[in-house]
Amino acid sequence: MNRKYRKAIIAGNWKMNTKPSEVKAFIEELRGLSNRTKWCETVICAPFTHLTVASRAFWNGHVSLGAQNMSEHPKGAYTGEVSAEMLRDVGVKYVIIGHSERRQYFGETDLTVNKKILAALEADLHPIVCVGESLEQRELGLTNELISYQVRAALAGVPADKLRKIVIAYEPIWAIGTGNTATAEQADEVCSLIRALVRGLYGARLARAMPILYGGSMNEKNAEELLAKPDIDGGLIGGASLVPEKFAAIINAANQE
């Protein structure tokens, strides 16, 4: 992390876990375990069914509310979809876009990811944009080319004055839910590449200000090492975000001096 230019973001992705009735107890427990400082913003991206409850449970801005997905359309006959305006109306600040599970299981493409990003920005939401490679792509030496393409496709049409709302999360697909984790050096190398790409597109000032997260199985054991790297500004946390003690340990690691 480089606190001179940006703060850390620790975002929990609950995926399809927990029930709305469990939100309040989780938050109360987390509050007693985690430190609050100006250096780190905590985000919980909860299922749609939880958002109204969560918006009431999150205390005094200590935890920001996030969603896990949204429609590219502002309104209309799209049964089962949720728009950016709907999310904002219930207090959502962040929304995950392009998670590998959405790409793998629901057919999201780089084109739909870009459309969702533009729709989120139009509604004044902060997209957490996920990019990452598979194990096969890494072994073929295609990581840099693939990440470059994904970042450029995601940011297509994004004006410079909206870039500060965007967070990019590097999530190597081969390290999600597998127990494998990229080394701190591997993760920082790709995060550095992402920052260089943004610098080439928007200039050094905006690139320095962009938070870039690591989303490949960051946990309470490896968080401090990962977050000590200069271009890793936080984490998009899966399983560990479901356990208050583990999630608090990651938040506290982000508050390291």
Image: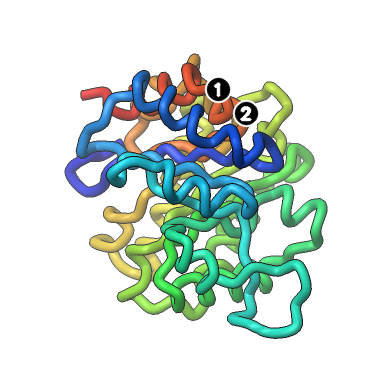
Question: Going by the image, does 65 lie left or right of 105?
Answer: left
What colour scheme governs how the chains and residues are painted in the rendered image of this protein? rainbow
x and y percentages locating residue 211 in the rendered image? 37, 49
Which residue corresponds to mark 2? 239
Label 1 Cα neighbours within 10 Å, binned few <14 / some 14-19 / many ≥20:
few
Q: Residue at x 69, y 22 (%)?
A: 179
Q: Residue at x 64, y 79 (%)?
A: 73
Label 2's element? Answer: helix
Q: Residue at x 36, y 31 (%)?
A: 229
Which residue corresponds to mark 1? 243
Q: Quadrant of residue 96?
A: bottom right
Question: Going by the image, does 5 lie left or right of 32?
Answer: left
Eye-nearest disc, 1 or 2: 1
Q: Is residue 12 above or below residue 66?
A: above
Does the residue at mark 1 contact the one at mark 2 (Cβ under 8 Å)? yes
Q: Quadrant of residue 165?
A: bottom left
Q: Amino acid at mark 1?
A: Val
Question: Going by the image, does 59 lie left or right of 129?
Answer: left
Q: Is residue 94 above or below residue 125?
A: above
